[in-house]
C-alpha cells in the first residue's frame, strides 16, 4: 500500500531551498507522482525548483483547501487505496497539515490505517519560539485573534494571563496588513514587564526577530512589520 | 558584532543528517568556532559527522544545561561581546532553546541587542502534530506530566477538557520508560471518542505514528512504545 508523505516547503518566496529543507526531501518527492496540495500553482512552482527527474506535466495534482467540502476529502485517497500510489501533501508554505485542511486528509488516512510520513522542514512557529528566549517547556499556538475590537482586547488579556499565571508561552499570528494594529493593541493592553517577541520574514534575507518587555517596546516604538508575515510571542520572565 | 546561531541536531542516534537538516546548516556551522551546548560529548559527536574544514580540537565549547547557575549564563556571551565571535547553540537533540536552558542564553542575547538566527531542523513536536491529523490552528505543548498519580490523572483530565472545550490540541511527552504507564492512564481516564495520537522514534528507521480514538486503542491494545522517545497528542474531532 502507498504512504502519505507530508512535504514542507520554504516559508517565503525568496528562500533558498537548501537553507530550509533537507537534501533527502528531494529524493522522496522525486518518487511521488500524485500530490494533494493547498494551491496547485504554488505547488508546481516549488516542484519546478526541485529539479525532479520527470516533468511537472507527468504529475497529478488535487487541491485540498478551505473550499474543499469535508465529505470530498476521503476520495482524495483513492489513487493510494486503488493503485497503491504514494501521496505527497503540500501546503502554501511551511509545514503541511498543521494549520491547513491537509489535517483532514491525514485524519482520514489514520482511519484507513495508511502510514503517514512527515518530512522535516521549517516551521515559523518553532523558529520564532526558539529565537524568542521564551519558555518552550510549555507553549500554546493560538492562530489568529478575533477581529472585533472588544473580543480582540479580551483575547490578548486572556493570553497574557495564561502566559503569566501558567508560565505558558503564548504564540499567535495576524494577517500581515493588520500586524501594526495588533502590535499597538498588545502594547496598550499588556503589563509593562510582560515580554513580547516579534519575529517576521523568518529565513528570508530581511528576517527580523526581537524580544523586549512591553515597556521597552513602548520607548523604542513599533518595528517595521507592516505587511510582513509575522509571529507574535507573549511570555513572562 | 557576532551573532547567535541556533543549530538543530538529529532527533535520534541513527538519523541520517541529510534526512533532517538542510545542507546550508553545515556551511554556517563551518564558520563558527565557539559553541554553547547542552552536552559537550553529544555536540562533538554531531560536529564530527558534519565534516567541517577544521578539527574539533580547534573549537571551543561551553556547557549550558540544567546544572548551570542562572547567574553564569550571561558570561557565556563574552566571546561574542569582546571578540565579535559568532556563537553556535546546540541542545541534546532536535531544536535548541525550545525545551532546554539555551533559552536563557537567547533571552540574555535579546537584552544585549545581539542578533539571534534560528536554523531550520527537525522538531518532534511539529513532526508528530502534522502527522497526527489533529487541529493545528490551536495547540499546546505541555512538556512532562506530574509524576504523582492523583496529579497525573488530574492533568490528563484537564488536557482532555481543553482539547474538547477549546478545540485546542494537547501535546505532551513522558520519560521513555514511563510511556506504557502513561498510555494506560490516558486510555483509562479519557472519553471513548477522544482522539489519541502516539508518535515515537520520529525520523528514525522504526518510526511509529498512529491516531485512534481511545475506544479503538482499548480494543487494539497498547503499541510497543516502551523506552522509545514518544510524543502523545490528545484532541477531539
Image (cartoon, coloured by chain):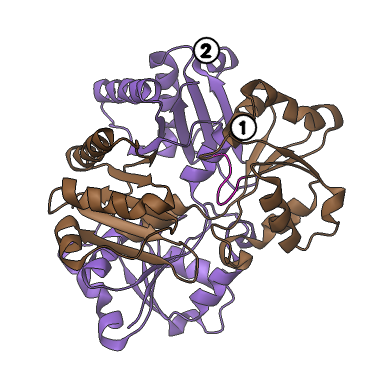
Chain colours: A brown, B purple
- Chain at numbered mark 1: A
Query: Which residue is located at x 50 percent, y 22 percent?
Result: B195
Q: Residue at x 27, y 38 (%)?
A: A149
Q: Which residue is mark 2?
A: B215
Across and down, in percent, residue B230 comes to 48, 38
Residue A81, image x and y in percent?
A: 79, 27
* Kind of element beneath mark 2: helix
According to the image, label 1 marks what residue? A67
Placement of B141 over or under A232, stated as above or below: above
Q: Is residue B152 magenta?
A: no
Same chain under badges 1 and 2? The reply is no
Location of the N terminus of chain B (image quadrant): bottom left
Judge the density around disc 2: few (<14), some (14-19), many (≥20) Cα neighbours within 10 Å: some
Q: Nearer the viewer, residue A55 or B168?
A: A55
Kindly check if marks 1 and 2 are in contact, taking CB atoms under 8 A apart as contact: no
Q: In this rendering, would B111 be left or right of A9? A: left
Residue A189 disc label: none
In this rendering, would B102 be left or right of B220? left
Q: Assign the magenta stretch its main secondary structure.
A: loop
Q: Quadrant of residue B140?
A: top left
- The subunit letter for the residue under badge 2 reads B
Question: What whole-number distance in Å separates the C-alpha atoms at marks 1 and 2?
Answer: 32 Å
Question: From this viewpoint, is residue B69 visible?
Answer: no
A60 lies left or right of A40: right
- A220, B118: nearer the viewer: A220
> Depth-wise, is mark 1 or mark 2 nearer the camera?
1
Give the extent of the magenta segment.
A91-97
Task: Count up the numbered dots.
Answer: 2
Secondary structure of the residue carrying tag 1 is loop
Amino acid at each position: 500500500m502507498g504512504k502519505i508523505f507530508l512535504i514542507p516547503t520554504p516559508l517565503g518566496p525568496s528562500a533558498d531551498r537548501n537553507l530550509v529543507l533537507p537534501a533527502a526531501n528531494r529524493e522522496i518527492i522525486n518518487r511521488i507522482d500524485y500530490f494533494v496540495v493547498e494551491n496547485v500553482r504554488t505547488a508546481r512552482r516549488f516542484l519546478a525548483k526541485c529539479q525532479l527527474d520527470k516533468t511537472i506535466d507527468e504529475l497529478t495534482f488535487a487541491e485540498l483547501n478551505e473550499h474543499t467540502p469535508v465529505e470530498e476529502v476521503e476520495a482524495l485517497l483513492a489513487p493510494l487505496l486503488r493503485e497503491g500510489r504514494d501521496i505527497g501533501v503540500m501546503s502554501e508554505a511551511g509545514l503541511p497539515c498543521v494549520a491547513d485542511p491537509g489535517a483532514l486528509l491525514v485524519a482520514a488516512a489514520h482511519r484507513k490505517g495508511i502510514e503517514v510520513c512527515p518530512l522535516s522542514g521549517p516551521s515559523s512557529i518553532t523558529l520564532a519560539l526558539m529565537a524568542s528566549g521564551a519558555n518552550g517547556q510549555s507553549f500554546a499556538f493560538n492562530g489568529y485573534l478575533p477581529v472585533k475590537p472588544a473580543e480582540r482586547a479580551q483575547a490578548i488579556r486572556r493570553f497574557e494571563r495564561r502566559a503569566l499565571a501558567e508560565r505558558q508561552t503564548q504564540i499567535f499570528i495576524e494577517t500581515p496588513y493588520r500586524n501594526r494594529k495588533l502590535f499597538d493593541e498588545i502594547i496598550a493592553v499588556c503589563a509593562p514587564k510582560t515580554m513580547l517577541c516579534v519575529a517576521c520574514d523568518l529565513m528570508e534575507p530581511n528576517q527580523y526577530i526581537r524580544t523586549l518587555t512591553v515597556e521597552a517596546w513602548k520607548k523604542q516604538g513599533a518595528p517595521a512589520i507592516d505587511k510582513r508575515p509575522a509571529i507574535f510571542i507573549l511570555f513572562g520572565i
